[in-house]
Image (tube, grey):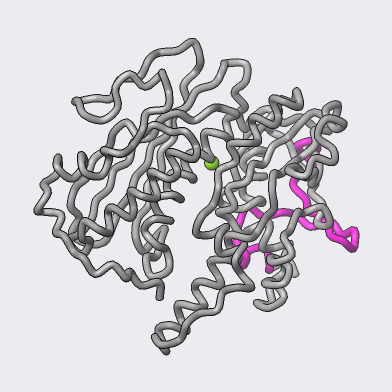
Amino acid sequence: MLEDKNQERTSLAELGEFGLINHLTKHFKIHHSSTVKGIGDDCAVLKNTEEEIVVTTDLLIEGVHFDLSYMPLKHLGYKAVMVNLSDVYAMNAEAQQITVSIAVSNRFPLEAIEELYAGIQLACNTYKIDLIGGDTTSSTKGMLLSVTAIGSAKKEDIVYRNGAKPTDLIVVSGDLGGAYLGLQVLEREKQVFNVNPQNQPDLDAYTYIIERQLKPEARKDIPALLKELGVKPTSMIDISDGLSSELFHICTQSKVGCKVYEEKFPLDPQVISTCEEFNLDSTMVALSGGEDYELLFTVSINDFDKIKGNPNLTVIGHVTEEAAGLHLVTRANQELELKAQGWNSFSDQE
Ligand SMILES: [Mg+2]
């Protein structure tokens, strides 16, 4: 449905592996002095700093993690970088380098891979990230994409998942549920397109949620904002699988419980209207949606004055003793036990 209008097709075999890497990466800039040598030798060389190094990696497989019938390759490249940077920011660290490895079948011409790398390059320039290496190889079927991100932070600044304490406040950045609903809209349009390829989708009412799905932004600004406010979270995680599942990670690792309030969940108006249209409960979408790449963290209640009223941050609840469990307080003041994930498992309670 989002058809590639570019009819030029250059076979990848024409360039060879080294020609291909050189061709794809020649316009990437180096932003950090910690990158001594990027692409072009047997290894990249990074300068050891006084800071601690954080490393994260992610593997994306066509048909499992992305669908190229509605995911343009440029967006895929951008998003693959974002999901990794998001993990670095969730450690309260600064991201500096990435490696990118891809395997593609001969279904993809050079022009397609150029599009993918255009997205990776846009992400690198926007977030000041150095592409320092990777690998390209052939696959028998489809596309496989792996990104590794490297960052650093002072030892005392790193925030783990295990530091939440009872009475801490639970905070999220941005808003929730948009990416999941964007995916629902794209899936629906794909079905319509399959039946009638002449149908031009009108997606104007869904621009924000589709962008949340196709072009998420990692919250680089939040660690910087917290530093500025003089707040160090007691625990932090990024929201990749859904609020509920991330709350479980924090509570399990911190050995605490939590109480979150339905009425506090930050929801964009497009999330609310699309939930009505799809007959979905917006609270459930916020809890189980995933892929929002916002940050979820806990702060001491003594820091409340520093964060209250900040348009980027919403307090959605507080940490409790472990024995109290994990609960959602509904608008009707009912307490429901949270489940780790899943629309179905949660709806069993209704
Ligand atoms: Mg994560």
Q: Position of residue 192 (x, y in %)?
A: 47, 84
For the residue pair 285 and 88, the one nearer the viewer reads as 88
For the point 68% across and 68% down, which residue is it? Answer: 348
Q: Position of residue 183 (x, y in %)?
A: 53, 66
Residue 340 in magenta stretch = yes
Q: How many marks?
A: 0
Q: Position of residue 294 (x, y in %)?
A: 62, 46
Which quadrant does the C terminus fall into? bottom right
For the point 35% across and 19% down, which residue is it? Answer: 46
For the point 80% across and 43% down, which residue is it? Answer: 315
Q: Position of residue 88 (x, y in %)?
A: 52, 33
Describe residue 184's horizontal placement relative to residue 346 as left or right: left
For the residue pair 333 and 300, the one nearer the viewer reads as 300
Work out whether 21 lies above or below 210.
Answer: above
Corner quadrant of residue 300: top right
Q: Quadrant of ligand 1?
A: top right
Residue 280 in magenta stretch = no
Span highlighted in magenta in the image? 320-347
